[in-house]
Amino acid sequence: MNAGDGLLDLAREGGRTSLFVVGTGKNAGKTVAMRAVATAAARRGLTIGLTSAGRDGEMFDAVDSAAKPRLFLEPGTLIATARALLSARHDYELLEETPWQTAAGPVVFARVRGAAFFELAGPPKASELRRCVERLREFGCDQTIVDGAIDRVAALAGGDDSVIVSVGPDAGTTIEEAALNARALVQRLCLPEYDPAQPYERIEGALTAEQAQSLMKNGAQRQVVVSDPTRVVIAGKAFLQLAERVALRCERPLHVVAVTVAPIGRERDFEPDAFRDAVARETGLPVFDVYAGAVSVEGKKASWIR
């Protein structure tokens, strides 16, 4: 078993068939994690459906022109991507064109017929992305994987997806800071379900920084309940400070199953074992380095055979 298999096993626990990979920011290794899970699923004979909350699989980043991980897809893979990203050099079957618009044209569903590198750009709106996942399932996908974006995490609301959090060196200037920011994101997405038998205050809409300051100042003694974790728009240390003083809960919990780390970044590199172990200690989740094929569980290393 390799790291991709380990992630896939965790993602499919409880019969879940859709997975979102969400990063702490850019260059967190989301595409590499997505690719590892997709490869593992293909080896098991599962029909895979892929899409992205942004744009992925391109050769170079549109912002800084740096090289990016590619997506080499095998025949039988289903994708939801912008129409303009499919060219004459691609061998594919067009399944459906949608009214969902991106900067590269409408989103289409297609089945890969010839192995090649593909780019993904899914629908920009959370409701459309939610429907996109459902449509891939309707087309017969056994496992759907979405390369997510933290600023579009609202797409997780209302689903029964597994979630993997990816973190890279850009999340902090030190290993400790990056691990702490990973903990903040994981803890925010892992809000426990509220207890209706206990006193609670329900927050309508989003929980903002201004509301958080008021709650901490007043020393809330009851549960503070949001509809789901995507409604909390506070991040990093500010969120951790709030969580220490306020009993944050939600009506519809998410299912965060693992973390992946990318020790090599644009601005700095981290020592792989130390980074992986630190993130495991902070988050309490299995932490996979898909580059090295290793995993840490609560600070304990384990090797994964490729």
Image (cartoon, grey):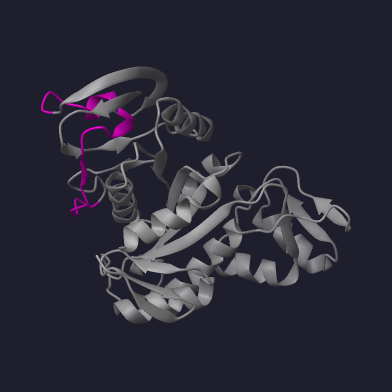
7 displayed left or right of 214: left
**Residue stretch in magenta:** 64-89
Magenta span contains residue 39: no
Count of residue discs: 0
Q: Single out the residue that lies furthest toward the front.
A: 44
Residue 12 position (above or below residue 120):
below
Relative to the observer, which residue lies in front, 72 or 230? Answer: 72
Relative to the observer, which residue lies in front, 173 or 78? Answer: 78
45 displayed left or right of 239: left
Residue 78 position (above or below residue 300):
above
Residue lying at 41% horizontally and 37% vertically, measured from the top left: 142
Looking at the rendered image, the quarter that the C terminus falls into is bottom left
**Residue 111: x and y, percent?**
27, 27
- Residue 192 visible: yes
Q: Residue 267's quadrant in the figure?
A: bottom left
Magenta span contains residue 69: yes
64 displayed left or right of 146: left
Q: Single out the residue that lies furthest toward the left.
A: 89
Residue lying at 57% horizontally and 70% vertically, measured from the top left: 237
- Residue 177 visible: no
Relative to the observer, which residue lies in front, 23 or 253? Answer: 253
Looking at the rendered image, the quarter that the N terminus falls into is bottom left
**Residue 202: x and y, percent?**
80, 49
Residue 148 position (above or below residue 224):
above
Relative to the observer, which residue lies in front, 278 or 257? Answer: 257
Residue lying at 68% horizontally and 47% vertically, measured from the top left: 252
**Residue 244: x and y, percent?**
69, 72
**Residue 88: x and y, percent?**
12, 23
